[in-house]
């Protein structure tokens, strides 16, 4: 059953549109700091309102995810059915690493200053209750391309398919309106990537570079990134996820990358996608994009419905 406003609590801003600026803030909760963390989480709407008041109509969205390690201590009640720590995936050539993280703040805004303003207020409110594990600032690049120069997120669901793919329904009624989210921070070897011809790059990605048209799927042997990331269940039903990936860069230090963030109604869909990429389908034919893009983080969170998050401050 597809979640709707009539059958499920209001979700957080999971399906908010991409913006010009974004930030991905991963935090670790200090032992014994659960009360303060609950209070700050419960005041998320208040912090967002403060930022929006001075935004002159510019968009600002905040989505909060909570990890398995602190779920019982911070939220309580039943744990979301599939929620588990990110599981390392070791392939013959590449590894999807697992790193620590208890809270995820995914911030999207029309302007960078709104993101900074929110982070200042948030970290001041948390104080020593949290430590920052990762803080990555993303930006929109060339009308939605990644730094490999291919359009990103072209397979995202839209319309009624968007909430159906991202929001938990009556299969886990205690967590209806919530969403699983997986994040990874990838660093690119741009020199090696640009050393490949356009035809080779297109074969690796599975789309044309100029206009993002899908290329035919390989029926056997090496599969493209697009094909490996297309997930169907045993009944032949295809399952989508929502990618809100953003490029990040520090040209002065030669750092260029993509922050992968995938929202899904079913965590196993993202996990299957990553396993196919890193292990291969068939093994050991891994996703060749990994020869040029290396993940340095890997975390899993659950984004509870808005009333659950608001209620943590009570």
Image: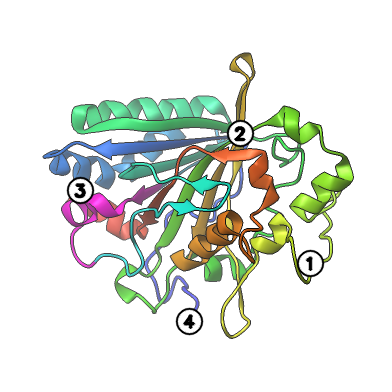
Residue ID for mark 3: 313
Q: Callout 4 environment at 10 Å: few (<14), some (14 to 19), or many (20+)?
A: few
Q: Which residue lies at the image location 14% right of the left edge and 39% below the top edge? A: 31
Q: Are marks 4 and 3 in contact (CB under 8 Å)?
A: no
Q: Earlier in the sequence, mark 1 or mark 4?
A: 4
Q: Secondary structure at mark 4?
A: loop
Q: Residue furthest top?
A: 252
Q: Are marks 4 and 2 in contact (CB under 8 Å)?
A: no
Residue 104 image offset from top left, x and y in percent: 38, 43
Compared with residue 284, is residue 2 higher up or lower down, i.e. above or below?
below
**Foreground residue among 55 and 166:** 166
**Foreground residue among 74 and 41:** 74
Residue 217 tag number:
1
Q: Which residue lies at the image location 87% right of the left edge and 42% below the top edge? A: 198
The magenta segment is: 64-78
Q: Are marks 1 and 2 in contact (CB under 8 Å)?
A: no
Q: Callout 2 environment at 10 Å: few (<14), some (14 to 19), or many (20+)?
A: many
Compared across the picture, whether 165 is left or right of 311 comes to right
Q: Quadrant of residue 161?
A: bottom right
Could you give the CA–CA distance between mark 1 and mark 4, rounded to whole angstroms?
Answer: 30 Å
Q: Is residue 122 visible to us here?
A: no
Could you give the CA–CA distance between mark 4 and mark 3, rounded to whole angstroms?
Answer: 30 Å
Residue 257 tag number:
2
Q: Secondary structure at mark 2?
A: strand
Residue ID for mark 4: 1
- In the rendered image, residue 65 lying in the magenta stretch gets the answer yes
Compared across the picture, whether 303 is left or right of 60 comes to left
* Front: mark 4 or 2: 2
Q: Are marks 2 and 3 in contact (CB under 8 Å)?
A: no
Residue 109 image offset from top left, x and y in percent: 54, 36
């Amino acid at each position: 059953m597809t979640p709707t406003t009539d059958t499920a609590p209001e979700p957080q801003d999971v399906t908010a549109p991409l913006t010009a600026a974004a930030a991905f803030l991963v935090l670790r909760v200090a032992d014994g700091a659960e009360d303060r963390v609950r209070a700050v989480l419960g005041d998320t709407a208040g912090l967002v309102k403060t930022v929006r008041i001075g935004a002159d109509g510019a968009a600002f969205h905040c989505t909060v995810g909570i990890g398995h390690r602190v779920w019982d201590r911070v939220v309580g009640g039943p744990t979301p059915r599939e929620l588990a720590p990110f599981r390392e995936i070791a392939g013959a050539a590449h590894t999807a690493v697992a790193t620590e993280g208890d809270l995820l703040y995914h911030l999207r805004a029309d302007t960078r200053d709104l993101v900074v303003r929110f982070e200042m207020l948030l970290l001041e409110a948390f104080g020593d209750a949290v430590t920052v594990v990762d803080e990555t600032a993303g930006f929109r690049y060339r009308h939605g391309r990644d730094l490999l120069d291919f359009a990103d997120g072209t397979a995202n669901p839209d319309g009624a398919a968007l909430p159906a793919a991202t929001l938990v329904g009556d299969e886990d009624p205690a967590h209806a309106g919530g969403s699983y989210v997986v994040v990874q921070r990838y660093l690119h070897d741009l020199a090696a990537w640009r050393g490949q011809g356009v035809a080779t790059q297109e074969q690796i990605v599975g789309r044309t570079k100029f206009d993002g048209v899908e290329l035919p799927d390989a029926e056997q042997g090496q599969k493209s990134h697009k094909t490996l990331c297309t997930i169907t269940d045993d009944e032949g039903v295809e399952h989508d996820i929502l990618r809100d990936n953003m490029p990040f860069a520090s040209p002065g230090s030669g750092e260029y990358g993509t922050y992968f963030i995938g929202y899904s109604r079913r965590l196993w869909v993202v996990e299957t996608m990553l396993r196919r990429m890193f292990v291969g389908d068939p093994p050991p034919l891994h996703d060749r994009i990994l020869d040029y893009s290396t993940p340095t983080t890997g975390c899993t969170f659950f984004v509870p419905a808005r009333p659950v998050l608001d209620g943590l401050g009570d």
